[in-house]
Image (spheres, rainbow, N blue to C red):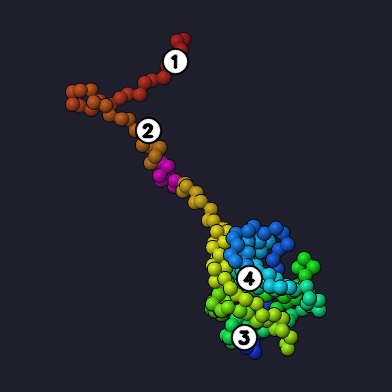
Amino acid sequence: MAFLFRCAAGLALCCLAVPSVAAPERWSVIGNWDISYYSATEGCLAYARFDHTDFFIGFDTREEKPALDLTVLDDRWESIEPDVTYPVTLMFGDEEPWTLDMRGVHMDDSPGLNILIDASMNKAETFIEEFQREMRMSWSYGDTKLGVFTLKGSRSAFQAVLDCQNAHAPQPAPEAEPMPDETEAIAASASADEEIPIEDGSGEDVIEATPAPLTAPK
């Protein structure tokens, strides 16, 4: 499970997943944001390209609890090693910084960083709110600046991610017709065998007799 903490504390890695290299199903395009469904992670992601950096944010729903999926890729980050943890600092606007313990990945030959965050946590909701509200995000690793990127259109983009995710949520199976219990089955059978009274015009009920079966003469 991932945990979100401010400043000195790290954001723990839940498990590794990166946007699938398989062709995604495009949901919509909003400004510079491309929103698609990725079958490998069963989640929708918003993607944007900032100069040399590719950025993805959305969901991974393969586990019982959905996760917020965050990935950044950059061909210039050649020193990144797969599966090595990197404490990265992220700031939305002038908000307090987040420290993310991200894992090194190589996706389609591009080095980068990925993290999954338990989406059910209140801190994850705060993270998303800041992403939607602020106008820029700043990334750094130690004293190295990784980039400052615009968040123009991020609110509409993430709302499209939610719409996409809801549209791809598993639909409940139709309920089967209940089978009648033994008492109901017996009652139904008895009702079908009852003789039906017929009026003959005299005002009295006449019981219709069941004709005897025909037998061949001996």
Tell me the quadrant of the picture where the N terminus can be found.
bottom right
The residue under label 1 is: 215
Tell which tag, 1 or 4, sits nearer the viewer: 4
Crowding at mark 4 (Cα within 10 Å: few <14, some 14-19, many 20+): many
The boundaries of the magenta stretch are 180-186
User: Predominant secondary structure in magenta?
Assistant: helix
Residue indicated by mark 2:
193
Marks 2/1: CA–CA distance: 23 Å
Q: Are marks 3 and 1 in contact (CB under 8 Å)?
A: no
Q: Nearer the viewer, mark 3 or mark 1?
A: 3
Residue 28: image x %, image y %? 59, 60
The verdict on residue 71 being magenta is: no
Q: Nearer the viewer, residue 132 or 180?
A: 132
Alpha-carbon span between mark 3 and mark 4: 18 Å
Kind of residue at badge 2: Asp
Image quadrant where residue 193 sits? top left
Left or right: 196 in relation to 215: left
- The local secondary structure at tag 2 comes to helix
- The answer for how far apart the CA atoms under marks 1 and 4 are is 83 Å
Give me the C-alpha separation between circle 3 and circle 1: 98 Å
Q: Within the image, what quadrant is residue 127 found in?
A: bottom right
Looking at the rendered structure, the kind of residue marked 3 is: Pro
Q: Earlier in the sequence, mark 3 or mark 1?
A: 3
Q: Residue at x 70, y 68 (%)?
A: 18
Q: Position of residue 66 (x, y in %)?
A: 59, 69
Badge 2: residue crowd in 10 Å (few <14, some 14–19, many ≥20): few
State the residue position of label 4: 57
Q: What residue is shown at x 80% (from left), y 68% (from top)? A: 109
Q: Is residue 78 left or right of residue 91?
A: right
- Discs 4/2, front: 4
